Image (cartoon, grey):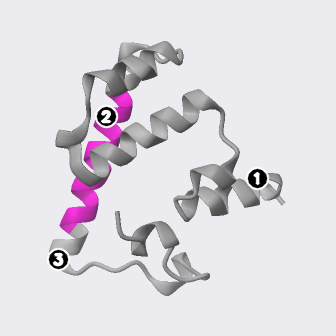
Amino acid sequence: MQGEAFGGVADALRDGDLDAAGLGTPERLLLEFTGTIARAAYRVTDEQVQGLRDAGWTDEQIAEAAYVASLFSLFVRLADTFGIEPPPAYEPNGIPAAVTREP
């Protein structure tokens, strides 16, 4: 089955467990950055962005990650505003821990 080899990684990411996902430093820093944007964008620091550059991300890649994280946050907020819930078939294992965990 396609993607089966990465099931554990996918589950860890779905649950917001970056430690269990076994990511490399550049990918982990980028996901931490997008998480900061999703939770409280005003907390993004110059040092965090420089850390991404130091890890090998270009300014264009960092900007694109910021755009995607911001747009996804917009979509989530709109869905929350209108009470849109995904069908249970989309989440057969229940609501991901990353959604239910307090920041």
- Residue 29, position as x, y percentages in the image: 49, 33
Q: Which residue is rendered at x = 15% and y = 73% of the image? A: 81
Which secondary structure dominates the residues rendered in magenta? Answer: helix
Looking at the image, residue 23 sits to the left or right of residue 73; the answer is right
Q: Which residue is rendered at x = 24% and y = 70% of the image? A: 79
Q: Is residue 61 above or below residue 21?
A: above
- Residue 4, position as x, y percentages in the image: 81, 58
- Residue 5, position as x, y percentages in the image: 83, 53
- Residue 97, position as x, y percentages in the image: 50, 72
In magenta stretch: residue 9:
no
Q: Is residue 65 above or below residue 71?
A: above
Amino acid under label 3?
A: Phe
Give the label, 2 or 3, closer to the camera: 2
Q: Which residue is mark 3?
A: 82
Among the two numbered marks 2 and 1 on one chain, the one whose residue lies closer to the N terminus: 1
> Where's the N terminus, which quadrant?
bottom right
Amino acid under label 1?
A: Phe
Give the label, 3 or 1, closer to the camera: 1
Amino acid under label 2?
A: Ala
Q: Which residue is mark 2?
A: 66
From mark 2 to mark 1, how far is it between C-alphas?
Answer: 25 Å
Q: Which residue is mark 1?
A: 6
Depth check: 91 or 102 in front? 102
Q: Which residue is rendered at x = 53% and y = 76% of the image? A: 90
